[in-house]
């Protein structure tokens, strides 16, 4: 990431280049946030009921680590199932809507509109239909990530450079070959940004569902501890969610670097 | 022929070369309520193994004409034929296209791009890889076989595109302003390289360009088209000897041929 920037020290002294490198700056920011987290409640800038110190948060977390890990496991399981719905379903429907014009013209505007609705409002209905067990979390998380994945995939398919398609057809590509060898690879950058947003939203969906009505999971744990004013436990839960989200984003980046290293960096906007 | 032997061995029937006939082709764009005539009664007889140029002002429908020759666009009237066969769909074994701007697939390496037409027709992996590498050697890009298009310069990309056209090995190669995006020096070099390739492996080439010098330098015949609706104004025979050399450009004959084409185009633009 910052390897290139580290090397480019433009004749400045090495120590300055290292100190001023983006990586150093990023770590410094992170350090400052962690330091503030520790100091603010300790110095009573913020009431410890509102924010527990970093050290007590981590200590309480590790004291109850089996409870946290068990609930993290529940969340992960629901998340994986939800991702199958969101990414798998979104990709399939996205390819269909992106490549079949009548479908696209009628359904795509509707899909965009649904994406703009804060889906949280329908969660009570969900729980009424399928209860507050795993099913509702999975369905809700899946639905949350489904629309961005669908829209990004459809957009990727729709904006494939027509020259590629003409060239492939002139070389004798059949319709299936055009889809497999031209449309899908060309749409990949857009699909990956769909995966990125879609999986982040799916994680939000699952955790939010757990917070509103569930019997287990990290979100459930956060809410339960909040009602009991166990501030440190709440923040340890939040910390786990942050780590979870960071891990997902990192996995997507790894996949992106391997699968789509052919398009220029500047395309990677999201 | 070294680079093409492998491919030819794969093909069951290698004809002695084919010409292309454009018979009274008219093309009308339907844009909602309006209809726009792009081509009006165009007829051309492109004989086998000739290097045939088409020049004309921008928007005269030369690119549409080329797409129709490739079977990618249907004429509103008239027909395009190879021998007795009407071209109504892409015929990759007979007709190949090298497009205007690089139409290389950016996620494939140079070699994968060049072998793509062979892949599509189910040629064995080792055979098509060797054919592609030989073709890349011929255009001087042997070392760049594993680079992706975004790692290549404009001239290199267009060399790969030409290599792809030759690797597909059709009898007729259609080229739609293949050097338009290049600077003049690269364009001249590539023109020469194209003539060398064509010399080793005679094909019928239809070469659309807006550069008059390029047209005279490369072609045996040049069809001059009018502004929209595109019509054939005249067909100029370029009776310069081959192989063509740069010093020919300084000759009076070259100048006369170029001036003749310019005169034809200029006259329609004044109308």
Image (cartoon, helix red, strand yellow):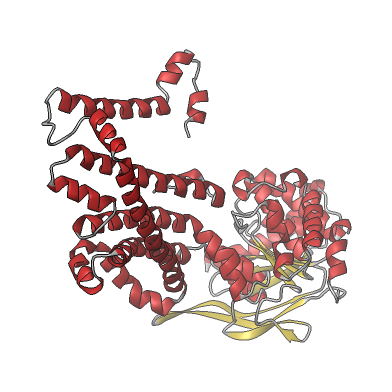
Counting from the top left corner in percent of width and height, residue B100 is at: 61, 59
Residue drawn at point x = 62 percent, y = 44 percent: B151
Residue drawn at point x = 21 percent, y = 68 percent: A127
Which one is nearer the viewer's eye here, B249 or A180? Answer: A180
Report the number of numbered marks: 0
Picture quadrant where residue A230 is located: top left
Vertical arrangement, residue B30 with respect to residue A198, above or below: below
Q: From the viewer's perspective, is B65 left or right of A94?
A: right
Work out whether residue A191 can be spotted. Answer: yes
Work out whether residue B57 can be spotted. Answer: no
Which one is nearer the viewer's eye here, A77 or B16? Answer: A77
Which one is nearer the viewer's eye here, B173 or A215? Answer: A215
Counting from the top left corner in percent of width and height, residue B112 is at: 69, 56
Residue drawn at point x = 41 percent, y = 68 percent: A89
Q: From the viewer's perspective, is A5 left or right of B230?
A: left
Vertical arrangement, residue A226 with respect to residue A10, above or below: below
Residue drawn at point x = 16 percent, y = 28 percent: A41
User: Where does the N terminus of chain B fall, quadrant-wise?
Assistant: bottom right
Which one is nearer the viewer's eye here, A169 or A125? Answer: A125
Counting from the top left corner in percent of width and height, residue A252 is at: 45, 49
Picture quadrant where residue A146 is located: bottom left
Counting from the top left corner in percent of width and height, residue B244 is at: 83, 53
Q: From the viewer's perspective, is A111 left or right of A188?
A: left
């Amino acid at each position: 990431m910052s390897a290139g920037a580290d090397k480019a020290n433009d004749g400045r002294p090495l120590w300055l280049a290292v100190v001023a490198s983006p990586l150093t700056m990023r770590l410094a920011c992170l350090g400052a946030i962690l330091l503030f987290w520790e100091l603010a409640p300790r110095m009573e800038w913020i009431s410890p009921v509102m924010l527990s110190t970093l050290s007590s948060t981590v200590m309480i977390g590790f004291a109850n680590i089996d409870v946290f890990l068990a609930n993290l496991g529940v969340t992960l399981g629901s998340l994986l199932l939800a991702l199958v719905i969101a990414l798998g379903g979104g990709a399939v429907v996205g390819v269909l809507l992106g490549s079949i014009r009548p479908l696209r013209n009628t359904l795509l505007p509707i899909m965009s509109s649904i994406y703009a609705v804060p889906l949280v409002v329908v969660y009570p209905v969900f729980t009424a239909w399928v209860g507050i067990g795993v099913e509702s979390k999975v369905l809700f998380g899946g639905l949350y990530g489904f629309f961005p994945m669908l829209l990004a995939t459809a957009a990727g398919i729709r904006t494939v450079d027509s020259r590629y398609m003409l060239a492939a057809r002139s070389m004798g590509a059949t319709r299936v070959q055009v889809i497999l060898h031209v449309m899908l690879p060309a749409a990949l950058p857009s699909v990956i940004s769909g995966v990125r947003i879609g999986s982040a939203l799916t994680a939000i969906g699952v955790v939010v569902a757990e917070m509103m009505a569930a019997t287990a999971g990290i979100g459930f744990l956060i809410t339960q501890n909040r009602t009991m004013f166990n501030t440190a436990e709440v923040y340890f839960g939040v910390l786990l969610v942050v780590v979870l989200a960071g891990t997902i984003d990192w996995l997507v980046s790894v996949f992106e670097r391997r699968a789509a290293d052919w398009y220029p960096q500047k395309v990677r906007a999201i | 022929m070294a680079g093409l032997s492998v491919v030819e061995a794969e093909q069951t029937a290698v004809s002695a070369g084919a010409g292309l006939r454009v018979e009274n082709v008219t093309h009308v764009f339907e844009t909602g309520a309006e209809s726009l005539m792009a081509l009006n009664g165009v007829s051309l007889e492109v004989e086998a193994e000739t290097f045939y140029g088409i020049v004309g002002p921008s928007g005269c429908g030369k690119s549409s004409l080329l797409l129709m020759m490739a079977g990618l666009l249907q004429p509103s009237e008239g027909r395009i034929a190879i021998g007795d066969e009407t071209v109504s769909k892409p015929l990759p074994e007979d007709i190949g296209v090298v497009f205007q701007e690089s139409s290389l697939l950016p996620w494939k390496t140079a070699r994968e791009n060049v072998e793509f037409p062979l892949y599509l027709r189910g040629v064995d992996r080792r055979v098509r890889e060797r054919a592609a590498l030989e073709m890349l050697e011929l255009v001087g890009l042997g070392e760049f076989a594993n680079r992706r298009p975004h790692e290549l310069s404009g001239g290199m990309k267009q060399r790969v595109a030409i290599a792809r056209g030759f690797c597909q090995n059709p009898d007729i190669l259609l080229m739609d302003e293949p050097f338009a995006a290049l600077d003049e020096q690269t364009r001249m070099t590539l023109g020469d390289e194209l003539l060398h390739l064509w010399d080793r492996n005679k094909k019928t080439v239809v070469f659309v360009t807006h550069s008059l010098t390029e047209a005279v330098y490369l072609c045996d015949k040049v069809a001059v088209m009018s502004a929209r609706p595109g019509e054939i104004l005249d067909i100029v025979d370029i009776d310069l000897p081959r192989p063509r050399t740069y010093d020919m450009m300084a000759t009076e004959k070259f100048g006369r041929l170029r001036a003749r084409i310019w005169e034809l185009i200029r006259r329609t633009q004044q109308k």
